[in-house]
Image (cartoon, grey):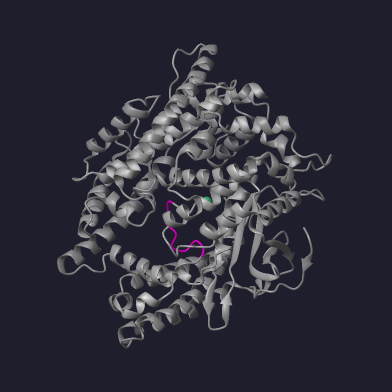
């Protein structure tokens, strides 16, 4: 992986020396310092506000790093002591941030800076940071007075109770179901799924495999079980969780009604006519009608392809003697077609993607695109398989990052990037950014390098896209540097954008080399992979769009809908867009925790929105050459380097020369006529 610098040129945490006590001490110390500074807001003299806010930012920078280290180690090197330390400090930390968001004197400091004559002389990044801070203060109700203020506080508190009850009900309903599988019901399940279901059975005291409503168990049955009545029974249990079909004390129905009513009232207190309008106030998408139009037009474009997808499922159903395709059949039928027509498994691709080759290929790609150099360096780490790298440009150090890519028992699942330290001007000069990038890939065995599946490759590139957004920022004002302050529906642009390279012939030449033969990924394997990428994408997209439209519409209604009204909205969207109508007992909405218990309320559309941005950005590379250095530099300059120093739509327009267009996403999804004229995708295999 190129030269090995030693020692690292950035100040780095000395991981082997960190203990739960030392981490806790540092968090408490920084928390006390930041709290003391916040308390001084009241006595800031006129004209001293900006200096004061900058000092406070330095304290928050220290606090973010102290907390960042503790939460990082809690996630990747978990021990009971560390978990206790973390859980013990979490309430103090959230109290600090809540109090800060409600702090009147602090709010007035920001207001006085914004209203001062000097504001116009501040850097655009600093101006934007102040505008965003004022916006967030106002959206958290700080400008309210009297009864409105009291009511707002009561609503906030009640809403957080309702969200947590919603999750609790769903969890209880999920855990209440267990069904031991007979030998007949196990037909079709692959050994890996059976192993998992056996483990679930053992944990619950059964001698045989069982199915529960946990995601992986449910999916295994829907995808592989040949026993149709079993699939139907499990489907029914899954889509009626936390509804009136189960125990009253687990029914989420009344909570949903109350949540929507309170969200609307909260939005109205803040001067919005719907909760959707409030949600969109912090996002890139302009307003409810624009998002509705966006989702409906995508759904209409996806529909003809979804119809073809359904046609294939129907043909498959006929061969099995099934007269109809029901919701509990679609994943099963799709899997049969996939196994037969795409003679390609993730396992068979793994030898082409040894980790050292993948990493040096990934680095070579971003080096070409952005003119940077990445070198591995010696540094203290928290596990022997962790690697540390630095990014340089023409001899200048830009930042550093750690890769911790392999699964371990003391590590949280999934993959993520966390921006541990941000670029920032400090009294000691420019602080350079540092990031942690974490995966859960299968670790190396013996003296063989780790081998990645193509799915894992996509994940790695995705997280690296987030990492570059954090590391290549040229903004040194903390609240708008890197991914700080970037609109929710735009923050996945750099990550989804990087994923495109894992599907390109030319790029795969750089990231694949068979672990024994040294060959790059053969053309037949590549086209099989590309064909499988679009398989059933029409039906999948329609389903996502149905959820997104439902989320948006129920949050745009004024007055807020009753429980029957919620169902009516969902029914009408399904009448218009769904190709496989769910049975009348379906209560999917009662388990839609993204919007009722998570942060996605009136924001579920963000997944598709960011996909359009990433597709459209990549489209310019396809036009100008995917390794065109000028295009790469333009993307770095206009998107990656800007952070939130200007609105996301402005950064996108500066790169693309226009507003985003859906065309590229349609093409990348295989939904344009150019692709439909080709023989069926699977025929290429
Ligand atoms: Zn992401």
User: 452 or 133: nearer the eye?
Assistant: 133
User: Which residue is depicted at the point 58% across and 54% down?
Assistant: 465
Horizontal and vertical percent for residue 245? 31, 33
Q: Is residue 188 visible?
A: no
Horizontal and vertical percent for residue 314? 49, 17
Left or right placement of residue 83 versus residue 170 in this view: right
User: Which residue is depicted at the point 66% across and 30% down?
Assistant: 528
Image quadrant where one finds the N terminus: bottom right
**On screen, 12 above or below 259?**
below
Horizontal and vertical percent for residue 522? 75, 34
**On screen, 485 above or below 211?**
below
| Residue 465 within the magenta-colored segment of the rendering | no
**On screen, 198 above or below 53?**
above
Say which quarter of the image contains residue 513.
top right
Say which quarter of the image contains residue 404.
bottom right
| Residue 487 within the magenta-colored segment of the rendering | yes
User: 659 or 648: nearer the eye?
Assistant: 659
Q: Is residue 285 visible?
A: yes
**On screen, 14 above or below 578?**
below
Point out the stretch of residues depicted in magenta: 482-489
Say which quarter of the image contains residue 554.
top left
């Amino acid at each position: 992986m190129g030269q090995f610098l030693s020692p690292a040129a950035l100040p780095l945490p000395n991981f082997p020396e960190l203990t739960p006590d030392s981490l806790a001490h540092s968090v408490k110390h920084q928390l006390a310092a930041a709290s003391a500074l916040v308390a001084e807001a009241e006595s800031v003299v006129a004209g001293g506000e900006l200096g004061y806010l900058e000092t406070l930012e330095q304290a928050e920078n220290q606090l973010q790093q102290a907390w960042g280290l503790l939460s990082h180690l809690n996630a990747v090197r978990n021990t009971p002591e560390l978990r206790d330390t973390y859980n013990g400090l979490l309430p103090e930390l959230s109290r600090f941030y809540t109090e800060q968001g409600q702090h009147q004197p602090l709010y007035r400091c920001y207001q006085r800076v914004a209203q001062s004559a000097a504001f116009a002389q501040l850097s655009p990044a600093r101006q934007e940071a102040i505008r965003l801070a004022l916006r967030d203060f106002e959206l958290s109700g700080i400008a309210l007075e009297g009864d409105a203020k009291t009511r707002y506080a009561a609503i906030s508190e009640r809403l957080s109770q309702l969200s947590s009850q919603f999750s609790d009900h769903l969890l209880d309903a999920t855990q209440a179901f267990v069904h031991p599988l007979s030998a007949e019901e196990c037909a079709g399940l692959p050994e890996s799924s059976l192993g998992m279901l056996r483990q679930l059975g053992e944990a619950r005291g059964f001698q045989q495999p069982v199915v529960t409503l946990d995601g992986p168990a449910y999916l295994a049955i829907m995808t592989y079980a040949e026993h149709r009545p079993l699939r139907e029974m499990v489907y029914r249990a899954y889509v009626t969780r936390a509804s009136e079909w189960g125990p009253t004390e687990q029914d989420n129905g009344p909570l949903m009604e109350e949540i929507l009513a309170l969200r609307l009232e909260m939005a109205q207190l803040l001067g919005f006519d719907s909760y959707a309008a409030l949600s969109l106030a912090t996002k890139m998408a302009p307003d409810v009608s624009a998002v509705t139009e966006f989702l409906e037009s995508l759904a209409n474009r996806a529909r003809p392809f979804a119809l073809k997808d359904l046609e294939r499922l129907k043909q498959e159903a006929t061969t099995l003697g099934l007269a109809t395709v029901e919701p509990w059949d679609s994943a099963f039928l799709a899997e049969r077609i996939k196994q037969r027509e795409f003679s390609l498994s993730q396992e068979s691709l793994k030898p082409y993607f040894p980790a050292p080759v993948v990493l040096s290929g990934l680095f070579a790609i971003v080096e070409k695109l952005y003119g940077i150099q990445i070198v591995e360096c010696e540094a203290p780490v928290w596990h022997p398989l962790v690697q540390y790298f630095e990014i340089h440009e023409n001899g200048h150090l830009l930042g550093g990052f750690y890769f911790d890519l392999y699964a371990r028992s003391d590590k949280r699942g999934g993959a993520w990037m966390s921006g541990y330290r941000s670029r920032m001007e400090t009294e000691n000069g420019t602080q350079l950014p540092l990031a942690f990038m974490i995966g859960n890939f299968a670790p190396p065995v013996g003296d063989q390098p780790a081998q990645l599946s193509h799915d894992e490759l996509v994940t790695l590139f995705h997280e690296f896209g987030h990492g570059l957004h954090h590391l290549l920022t040229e903004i040194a004002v903390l609240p708008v540097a890197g991914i700080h302050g970037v609109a929710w529906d735009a923050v996945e642009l750099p990550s989804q954008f990087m994923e495109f390279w894992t599907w390109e012939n030319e790029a795969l030449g750089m990231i694949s080399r068979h672990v024994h033969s040294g060959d790059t990924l053969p053309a037949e394997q590549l086209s099989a992979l590309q064909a499988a990428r679009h398989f059933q994408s029409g039906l999948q997209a329609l389903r996502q769009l149905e959820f997104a439209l439902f989320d948006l519409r129920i949050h745009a209604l004024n007055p807020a809908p009753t429980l029957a009204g919620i169902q009516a909205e969902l029914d009408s969207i399904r009448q218009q867009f769904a190709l496989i109508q769910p049975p009348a007992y379906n209560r999917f909405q009662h388990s839609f925790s993204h919007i009722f218990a998570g942060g996605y309320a009136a924001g579920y559309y963000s997944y598709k929105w960011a996909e359009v941005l990433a597709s459209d950005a990549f489209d310019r590379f396809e036009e100008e050459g995917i390794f065109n250095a000028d295009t790469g530099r333009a993307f770095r300059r206009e998107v990656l380097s800007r952070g939130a120093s200007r609105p996301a739509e402005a950064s996108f327009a500066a790169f693309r020369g226009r507003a985003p267009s859906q065309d590229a996403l349609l093409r990348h999804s295989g939904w344009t006529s150019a692709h439909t004229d080709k023989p069926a995708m699977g025929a290429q295999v």
